[in-house]
Amino acid sequence: MNRLLTELQRLYAPTAPDNAPAEGQVRALLLELARPADWDALGAVWRGVQADLELPAPAIAVNGVDGYQLWFSLAEPVPAAQALAFLEGLRRRYLGGIAAQRLRLETVAQEMPPRQLPSGLWSALLAPDLAPVFTDEPWLDTEPGAEGQADLLCRLQPIKSADFRAALERLVPGTPAPRVDTASAAPAPSADAGQDAPRRFLLGVMNDASAPLHLRIEAAKALL
């Protein structure tokens, strides 16, 4: 296995090392700003999660077409609803003035860079100091080197469970904390009341006209 694939799996594979996530749980979170690419705005998120929320830096990428991306890695899988709540909290805190149609918030890792687009251009991971260079052309003309891409990822660390819970509470007060060990835990007598909160949150996101369309769709899928 090459270094790049090893690093991608370490950070973004659905299953964390020695831990099998329950159905509907995720580790990879994507926040994209496009049409047009705007590093000044998305860079504020990248800096804010570190300075304000005391979280590890997410990976920075260009999507190969028209925008920048931040890829967040979680040390332990969390329910998709809580991952979406985290992303929505970041949107509201740092990108409230950005039009919803320019944002994409998802909990999948199927489009991780680097990869070649139908246009022949490439998405790629970027070093923070090079991110502003790609504002006008958020792509690479040629395939990025696998070793260089792996070097960028090997410096990153996933967000620890306790840190994610603390950040989620700051971004979305009252959101139920993610449960790390769900494999054998029996439902508590008050479980129904606890499960009601994420349902209410998802309904709120789905019906929020100011939320990005992708997020509203993901909320609807989670409800189904």
Image (cartoon, rainbow, N blue to C red):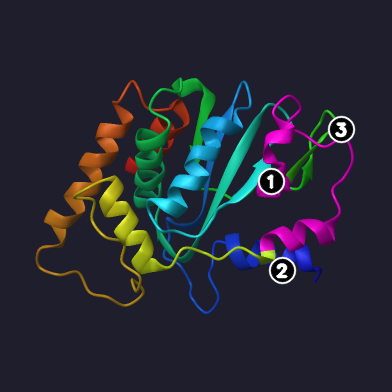
> Are the residues tagged 3 and 2 within 8 Å (C-beta)?
no
Q: Secondary structure at mark 1?
A: helix
- Quadrant, the N terminus: bottom right
> Mark 1 = which residue?
129
Mark before the other along the chain sequence, 3 or 2: 2
> Mark 2 = which residue?
6
Residue type beneath disc 2:
Thr
Horizontal side of residue 74 vs 181, given as left or right: right
Q: Secondary structure at mark 2?
A: helix
The residue carrying pointer 3 sits among few (fewer than 14), some (14 to 19) or many (20 or more) residues within 10 Å by Cα, namely: few
Which residue is located at x 63 percent, y 46 percent? 60
Query: Which quadrant would residue 216 be assigned to in this image?
Result: top left
Q: Secondary structure at mark 3?
A: loop
The residue carrying pointer 2 sits among few (fewer than 14), some (14 to 19) or many (20 or more) residues within 10 Å by Cα, namely: some
Query: Which quadrant would residue 34 be assigned to in this image?
Result: top right
Horizontal side of residue 146 vs 60, given as left or right: right
Residue type beneath disc 3:
Gly
> Residue 136, percent across and down?
73, 24
In three-dimensional space, the C-alpha distance between marks 1 and 2, rounded to whole angstroms, equals 24 Å
> Residue 148, percent across and down?
81, 58
User: Can residue 111 be seen at all in this image of the molecule?
Assistant: no
> Are the residues tagged 1 and 2 within 8 Å (C-beta)?
no
Mark before the other along the chain sequence, 1 or 2: 2
Horizontal side of residue 24 vs 42, given as left or right: left
1 vs 3, front mark? 1
In three-dimensional space, the C-alpha distance between marks 1 and 3, rounded to whole angstroms, equals 25 Å
First to last magenta residue range: 125-153
Which residue is located at x 35 percent, y 48 percent? 81
Mark before the other along the chain sequence, 1 or 3: 3
Residue type beneath disc 1:
Asp
The disc label shown at residue 120, or none: 3
